[in-house]
Image (tube, rainbow, N blue to C red):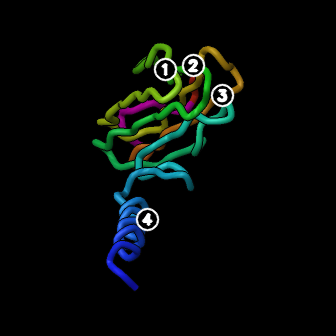
Amino acid sequence: MNLTRLIPIVMTAALFFTACEDNGGGDENGPGDNEVWMENTAYNPQQLSVDIGATVTWINKDGVDHTVTSGEGLFDSGNISAGGTFEYTFDSAGTYNYGCTIHPDMSGSINVGSSSGNGGNGDDDY
């Protein structure tokens, strides 16, 4: 095999293996650690457990706007356009419910550490 034919094959293989590299974030198979995707007018995952001090990132994978609005009034992302993100750091243990103000059927919850802390109690809407 001559060198001119070998170079495109090597380049293609290098690109393939670089694209398949796992960096710990989400990919086409689903969200990464501490990530929630907004897709198909739902939060994925709908329930997420994280450690105290963790930052959760919501990523809008839909073609329409969504919000991430705390039932406890702790955070409100405002409208998140397609491809946009929102982050929130959870500093206290508890269960934090949230939803999308644009799509009332969308809801989710974040369970932080032990539910016996000072955080949300899970009784609020969403």
State which tag comes first along the sequence, 2 or 1. 2
Question: Which residue corresponds to mark 4?
Answer: 16
Quadrant the N terminus occupies: bottom left
The boundaries of the magenta stretch are 116-122
Give the spatial CA distance, label 1 vs label 4.
32 Å
Contact check, label 2 and label 1, Cβ < 8 Å: yes
Give the spatial CA distance, label 2 vs label 3.
12 Å
Question: Which residue corresponds to mark 3?
Answer: 106
Q: Nearer the viewer, mark 4 or mark 3?
A: 4
Front residue of this view, candidates 40 and 45: 40
Q: Position of residue 90 (x, y in %)?
A: 34, 36
Residue at horizontal 58%, vertical 25%? 99
State which tag comes first along the sequence, 2 or 3. 2
Q: Nearer the viewer, mark 1 or mark 4?
A: 4
Question: Which residue corresponds to mark 2?
Answer: 65
- CA neighbours of label 2 inside 10 A, class few (<14), some (14 to 19), many (20+): some
Three-letter amino acid code at disc 3? Met
